[in-house]
Image (cartoon, rainbow, N blue to C red):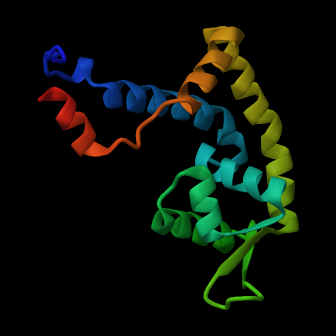
Amino acid sequence: MQEVQPVGVEQCNCFAVRKAARQISRLYDAFLEPSGLRITQFLILATLDEQQSASINALAERLDIERTAMGKMIGFLERDGFVTMRPAPTDGRVRIVELTAEGRALFERATPLWLEAQHQFSVMNGAKKVAGLRRSLAGMKVDGGPSSSLEELS
């Protein structure tokens, strides 16, 4: 039988990860502020720079953002002239997103700011620790579902 942990915020794995994620996001947002981008927007532009174009669903999946939230973010980027959307040639219901020349220029201006955020985060936490953190997070298993963990407790 598994030992029961005390219930509390500080013992919650999800809280610890979310708190760290919010703090790290604020760090990156602060570095990116001169570009006018937040880290989520920068990552959308970076993904489009890597892939040239992607559907909203593919972007949402790649960045692990809910599809509706991704659609709203893309809408703002489109409104500001940084991306364009067009129907997919094989299915007109699917929207393909691409960087505009202005979006690519913004990404190029923001990249040194992002690199500085990366550097400062590594300086604050140690390069080995940061690399280990990325490896550990990539290896986390969370798809067991609630029924399997409840069975372990009985």
Residue at the image position 73 percent from the left and 84 percent from the top: 88
Q: How many discs appear?
A: 0
Q: Position of residue 77 (x, y in %)?
A: 66, 66
Q: Position of residue 75 (x, y in %)?
A: 59, 72
Quarter location, residue 93 = bottom right
- Please indicate whether residue 21 sits to the left or right of residue 4 in the image: right
Quarter location, residue 86 = bottom right
89 or 126, which is in the foreground? 89
Q: Position of residue 126 (x, y in %)?
A: 66, 8
49 or 136, which is in the foreground? 136
Quarter location, residue 62 = bottom right
Image quadrant holding the C terminus, namely top left
Is residue 60 positioned above or below 107 on the image? below
Is residue 107 positioned above or below 82 on the image? above
- Please indicate whether residue 101 sits to the left or right of residue 140 in the image: right
Residue at the image position 25 percent from the left and 43 percent from the top: 146
- Please indicate whether residue 110 sits to the left or right of residue 131 in the image: right
- Please indicate whether residue 67 sits to the left or right of residue 127 in the image: left
Residue at the image position 58 percent from the left and 32 percent from the top: 138
Is residue 93 positioned above or below 81 on the image? below
Image quadrant holding the N terminus, namely top left
Residue at the image position 17 percent from the left and 16 percent from the top: 5
Q: Position of residue 43 (x, y in %)?
A: 67, 48
